[in-house]
Amino acid sequence: MDKQKWKQYWNILTSNNLGLFGLGILVVFVLIAIFAPLIAPYDPAERVGQPFMKPNGDFLLGTNDVGQDILSELIYGTRVSLLIGVIAAFISIVIGCFIGIIAGYYGGKIDSLLMRLVDLVLVIPFLPLMILLAAFVGPSFWNIILVISLTSWASPARVVRSQVLTLKTSGYVEAAKSIGTDVKEILLKHILPGVFPILLSQFILAASSAILVEASLSFLGLGDPFTKSWGTILYYAQARGAFLTDAWVWWILPPGILLTALVIAFAFTGYSLEEILNPRLRKER
């Protein structure tokens, strides 16, 4: 891609205040996740104070019921929540992309079979299915990612299929078929680049959703007990009596605010990305 094109994309991004705001928040969260050991004042697993200490100069967000620093928990929890969200979103997009491309390109019985599978996944109640799967496979970091991935691929698959149905009738694809180009080469060189912009926007949406799903499962006690994500912090807060004291102010509100901020950041960034990749969404400048 030439420099002129990148410059055009950069101008579109910088002219979108919501996009810049969302991207800025995401960058902050990513930096916090990367440099968590340097930023966190304490080890989140160590008891460094008295239980239920209110916020003070030593503990900016107080301590939990066993004397662990809540601020340090949140900082390390950023790493876990982001990692689960990104990995789960990537896996679900890969599955959805593969099924969507195969269904859209080949059509016929293959398309009907795969779309009935997509319909089945979409029609099953989302939260009960996730709870059932999470309870069945057991709580762990990778099991949570597996559960989210297996329940989140259907929507991207349907979106990708719709785009492939349009792309496979385009002139350059028909020309490639007419000269006997291998199907794998057509899919990789002609179809996949055409759906890539949609995949980017779907990835942003899937990552945001995956972070919320992880928080929900962890809040219900189905998260990994050996890693502290924002959802796990909320689970322990409600399970250990934070609502019975004024500790909810510094133990429950902060992770809730962080979850909200991260989801909003993904939403704003996704909107800006769609505006860049879809010229019809651009405002007159």
Image: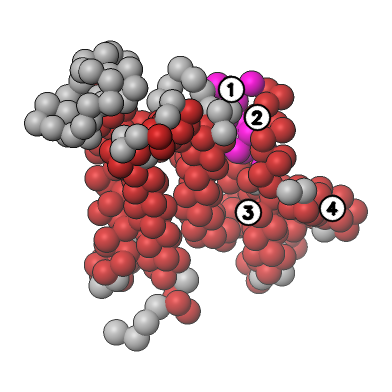
Mark 3 or 1, closer to the camera: 1
Apparent side of residue 206 relative to residue 155 in the rendered image (left or right): left
Label 3 is placed on what type of residue?
Answer: Pro
Label 2 is placed on what type of residue?
Answer: Ala
Residue found 73% across the figure and 49% down from its top: 125
Structural crowding at the residue carrying mark 3, measured as other residues with C-alpha within 10 Å and reported as few (<14), some (14–19) or many (≥20): many
Q: Which residues are magenta?
A: 138-151
Residue found 47% across the figure and 79% down from its top: 280
Residue labelled with disc 2 = 134
Instruction: State how far apart marks 3 and 2 are (Cα).
Output: 22 Å
Residue labelled with disc 3 = 156
The circle on residue 116 is 4
Apparent side of residue 81 relative to residue 168 in the rendered image (left or right): left
Residue found 72% across the figure and 33% down from its top: 132
Instruction: State how far apart marks 2 and 4 are (Cα).
Output: 24 Å
Structural crowding at the residue carrying mark 1, measured as other residues with C-alpha within 10 Å and reported as few (<14), some (14–19) or many (≥20): some
Secondary element at image label 4: helix
Mark 1 or 4, closer to the camera: 1
